[in-house]
Amino acid sequence: VVESVPASAQYKEDTGYSKKVSWIRKDNFIEAKVEYYDLGGQLLKVQTTSGYQKAETNPDRWVVLHREMDNVQTGHKTTLDFGKVNAGVAVDDSVFSTRSLERQ
């Protein structure tokens, strides 16, 4: 378990988090669970991961296939599921523009 705090007050304000607590798996070094705390020090969000696989192009690297983020203050939940991840494919920067992401 690793507790992280912002290095500066400015970074704390920019991120909106006063700290995060991460549970790191020993076998693949992936965050299994992360708790994010708001600026007042109250638990805000909890992220959990599952469904790990070795990257096809680099067997020393692991990827997460399922990720959930729960906002415990609002009750909102976001879930990401990936059927297959290929870590060795170059992706053009334009794919990550606001316009492109909103189109998806």
Image (spheres, rainbow, N blue to C red):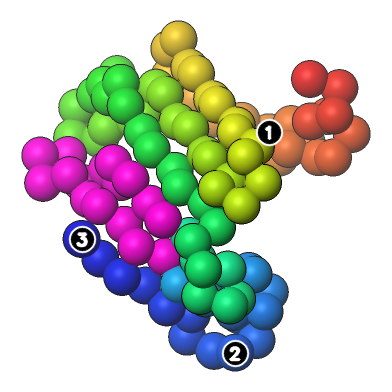
Tag 1 near tag 3, CB within 8 Å: no
Q: Residue at x 17, y 44 (%)?
A: 25
Residue mark closest to the camera, 2 vs 1: 2
- Secondary element at image label 2: helix
Q: Residue beneath label 1, please?
A: 92
Give amino acid for label 2: Ala
Q: Residue beneath label 3, please?
A: 1
Residue 44 magenta-highlighted: no
Give amino acid for label 3: Val
The crowd level at tag 1 (other Cα within 10 Å; few <14, some 14-19, many 20+) is few
Quarter occupied by residue 101: top right
Q: Say left or right for 31 vs 27.
A: right
Residue 25 magenta-highlighted: yes
Q: Residue at x 44, y 43 (%)?
A: 47
Number of residue marks: 3
Q: Main secondary structure of the magenta part?
A: strand
Quarter occupied by residue 59: top left
Q: Residue beneath label 2, please?
A: 9
